[in-house]
Amino acid sequence: MSAKPFAVLPPAAAPVATPSQWADWGLWDAPKRIFTPRVLVGLVAAFGVCLLAGEAYAQLNGQQRPGVLATIWRWLPLILLGPPGEVGGFLLNILVSFLTMAIGTVTGIILGVLQVSQGLIVRRVAWAVTQFFRNSPWLVLLFFAILLLPFRMNLFGEIVPFPSWIKAVIGLALPIMANIAEVTRGAINSIPTGQWESAESLAFARGQTFRLIILPQCVKRMLPPWMNWYAILTMATTLISIVGVADSMTLTQQALAAEGGRSELLIPMYGMLLLLFFLYCYPIARWTLYLERRYAIVT
Amino acid sequence: MAGLAEWFRSLYTDYGINFVHFYDDYERARFFRGMWVTIKISAVSVLASIVIGILGAWLQTSGNRFVRSFTQGYIQFFRNTPPLVQMYFFYFALGPLLPRVHTEYGTLQPMLSNFTWAAISLSFFAGAFNVEIFRSGIEAVPRTMTEAASALGYTQMQVYRYVVFPLGIRIVIPALTNNIVNLIKTTTLAYAIAVPEALFVANQIWSDRVNVMEMMLTLFVFYIGLVGIVVWVMDRWEKALRIPGYGQ
């Protein structure tokens, strides 16, 4: 008599979030109330004060050159998009932030999972790596990557150039990796033990439990802190100007130099750069807050 | 001490590992001055940012709508713009507006040094986070407690001083520690406006002596050590403040 199959087999695990579920999580309807009239008034007022300060300074020194606003308008395309035919300026900041976040997330999740591994040595080493990169200053890590990585590599007989912006991406990815690892570890630890136990009683292997039960639940918990780290990273991308990449910070300084030391431009130009980053990062911050509140467990 | 210096010197002569700042008097003095500047700028900014945080949290409870909006604007602005650009804004854009003063040698120099500007900008940056942290601490104190204190005849100020503050501070220590650690790491940005702090002098030394790896290692040890000490102190403080039956 052959063994009968179980009458009730556990159903296939539900797939990771489908697009409709994403909508259900409030990802798409959140940003509506970000730039409220109050915020817009504040922004216009702050930038207006910068412009006025510049204009007043110019008037005091009796200068007859193009106005402050006109000058800023002339340089804006360069600062936003970089020199024609190259990627630079604010666009490069965004590009670097995307690449860094992608690398940092993948490596960070791996590192985070290793931190809850069953092997003691693996766990300890993963912990040490995380703490090291989490507690080192970003700028030092950036110098570390810029100065100690080669400027080209011999990859399978091909000479691959390693421009400094790629090295900068690696340098910034290190602290992001460590912080995402912490986020991952926190999320895994926040899943109730019951989930592990029921998975075990249903004869899931540890790897299966991770892949099919634990990690899918972590995604939602990790999303708000992950977005928060993305915003922090985007702001940190200005650090690459220190190591000589032509991002928006570098180009703003070059534009100021090209104008020949017109000191009335200093406040408006730097003010505009602050405004640019604010316009990009503030929505992310509000959205993160919204999701945090939405996902919060009401006690 | 001299023996240690000799050991580091032999490490260089025998193995080419050049920890020059451990055996050469000039470089040692330079590097230690840099570390001292980092410690000073961290201490000043931490204190100032805590003052800003307490002040801001107090202003947020103000009855005046304009004051509240202004505080909120300050927080959002400093939280959502890059600290490096803030520092440039303070140093390069606001700095030239201040009058120049005569030094004792009769030369003109800016009223505020780059160290001061770095400390101001870092304080405002970290202060914005501290406002939120302290506000959350105040809000975490149960309303029933403040009401009970009022019922016992405490004035508004006394309620803050004897009830809200002592309880709130216990709640915010972990978040405050995080922010202080972050601030210490952010002091490296002062490099960009040529404040001679640890990273800046390390850069000078590795430019002179071509020992990037060794200087990097020292920097990592220094910063992680500094952060470690701060975390340890705050941890001890949290334990010392713990009262039975409240919190964990």
Image (cartoon, rainbow, N blue to C red):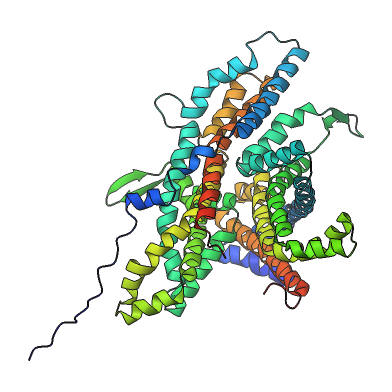
* The C terminus of chain A: image quadrant: bottom right
Q: Can you name the residue that lies furthest to the top here? A: A64
Q: Quadrant of residue B88?
A: top right
Residue sitting at 57 percent across and 24 percent down?
A: A255
* Residue at the spot 40% in from the left edge and 76% down from the top edge: A196
What is the residue that sits farthest to the front in this orientation?
B151
Residue A281 left/right relative to B27: left
Asked which quadrant contains residue B246, the reply is bottom right
Say whether residue B16 is visible.
no
Viewer-proximal residue among B1 and B212 = B212
For the question of whether residue B70 can be seen, the reply is yes
For the point 75% across and 10% down, which residue is it? A62
Decide: is B65 above or below A7: above
Q: Which residue is painted at 52% across and 27% down in the image?
A: A79
**Which quadrant is home to the N terminus of chain A?**
bottom left
Question: What is the x, y in percent for residue A68?
Answer: 64, 17
Horizontal relation, residue B4 to residue A217: left or right: right
Counting every numbered tag in the picture gives: 0
- Residue A284 drawn above or below residue A148: above
B94 displayed left or right of A233: right
Q: Residue furthest bottom?
A: A1
Q: Name the residue furthest left.
A: A1
The spot of residue B159 in percent (x, y) is 85, 60
Nearest to the observer: residue A250 or residue B201 = A250
Task: State the image coordinates of residue A259 (x, y, percent, origin top left).
Answer: 61, 18
Q: Give x and y (percent) for residue B30.
A: 73, 52
